[in-house]
């Protein structure tokens, strides 16, 4: 089994929109910085497109093929003038049922978020469409990521969804770092790390006595125990 200590962490700077060649050169654990256009997507975006049946109001596949599951800290000091000094990722698993359709229909090559996504989504959607998942690095870096935002190129569906849920088209430069959590083969950085943790965790159960209260459902199987 491949192990995390065998991975190389390279610093990679990519121009957007992403090409198939660029995504296929990335490896698990690479620290990626992006320059070009990205767009944000939260519940409002996915509901508009996949529940209401509206077409996205921008050319995703050709001009803006990277999306960010995030909550921009937006201020509007004057009408139509926006300032985003900080941006924080939101958990991507919340949008898992929509992401496969997003990749299939609109040619999205990279999804940015936090927490990763389910193995099934990686194998059936990301691997199939040659897309990658990029994760933010820990908490408290919202202002760091904000430094990579050069300007708001456009804001879409603001009246319908409000500032927090609107689709923000952002021009970014050296925007990052983001870690490659899922590569185009569907391999997961978090998956590798979890497997290594489980190896150590399972050893803690070796030699444990039989539970005194097993008649009440007490178990000592690490694969079945609920934490």
Image (cartoon, helix red, strand yellow):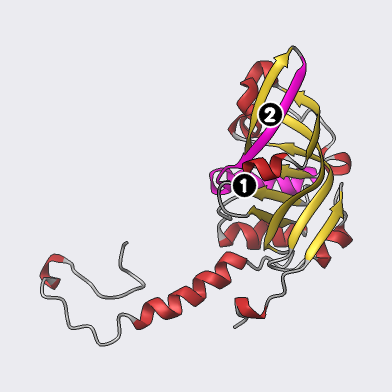
Q: Quadrant of residue 41?
A: top right
Does residue 68 show up?
no
Q: Earlier in the sequence, mark 2 or mark 1?
A: 2
Q: Residue at x 80, y 26 (%)?
A: 154
Q: Where on the picture, by quarter, is residue 168?
A: top right
Q: What span is in magenta?
A: 80-107
The residue identified by callout 2 is: 53
Which image quarter: residue 208? bottom left
The residue lying toward the viewer, choosing from 165 and 89, is 89
Q: What separation in Å lies between label 2 and label 1 (alpha carbons)? A: 35 Å
**Pointers 2 and 1 in contact (C-beta within 8 Å):** no
| Front of the two marks 2 and 1 | 1
Density class for disc 1 (Cα within 10 Å; few <14, some 14-19, many ≥20) is some
Q: Residue at x 68, y 49 (%)?
A: 112
Q: Is residue 141 left or right of residue 213?
A: right
Circle 1 SS class: loop
The structure residue drawn at horizontal position 88% and vertical position 40%, both measured from the top left corner, is 63
Q: Disc 1 designates what residue? A: 141
Q: Position of residue 87 (x, y in %)?
A: 65, 38
Q: Nearer the viewer, residue 138 or 185?
A: 138
Mark sitting on residue 58: none
What quarter of the picture does the N terminus occupy?
Answer: bottom right
Rendering coords of residue 145 (x, y %):
70, 44
């Amino acid at each position: 089994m491949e192990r995390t200590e065998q991975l190389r962490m390279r610093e990679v700077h990519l121009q957007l929109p992403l090409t198939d060649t660029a995504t296929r050169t990335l490896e698990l654990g690479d620290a990626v910085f992006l320059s070009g256009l990205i767009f944000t997507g939260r519940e409002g975006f996915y509901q508009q497109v996949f529940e209401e049946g509206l077409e996205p109001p921008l050319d995703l596949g050709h001009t803006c093929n990277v999306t960010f599951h995030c909550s921009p800290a937006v201020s509007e000091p004057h009408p139509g003038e926006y300032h985003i000094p900080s941006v924080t990722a939101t958990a991507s698993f919340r949008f898992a049922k929509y992401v496969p359709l997003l990749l299939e229909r609109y040619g999205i090559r990279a999804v940015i978020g936090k927490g990763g996504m389910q193995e099934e989504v990686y194998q059936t959607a990301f691997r199939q469409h040659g897309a990658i998942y990029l994760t933010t690095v820990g908490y408290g870096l919202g202002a760091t990521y904000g430094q990579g935002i050069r300007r708001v190129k456009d804001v879409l569906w603001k009246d319908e969804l409000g500032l927090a849920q609107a689709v923000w088209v952002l021009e970014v430069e050296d925007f990052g770092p983001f870690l490659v959590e899922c590569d185009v083969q569907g391999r997961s950085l978090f998956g590798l790390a979890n497997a290594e943790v489980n190896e150590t965790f399972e050893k803690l159960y070796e030699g444990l006595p039989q539970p005194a209260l097993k008649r009440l459902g007490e178990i000592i199987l690490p694969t079945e125990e609920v934490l």
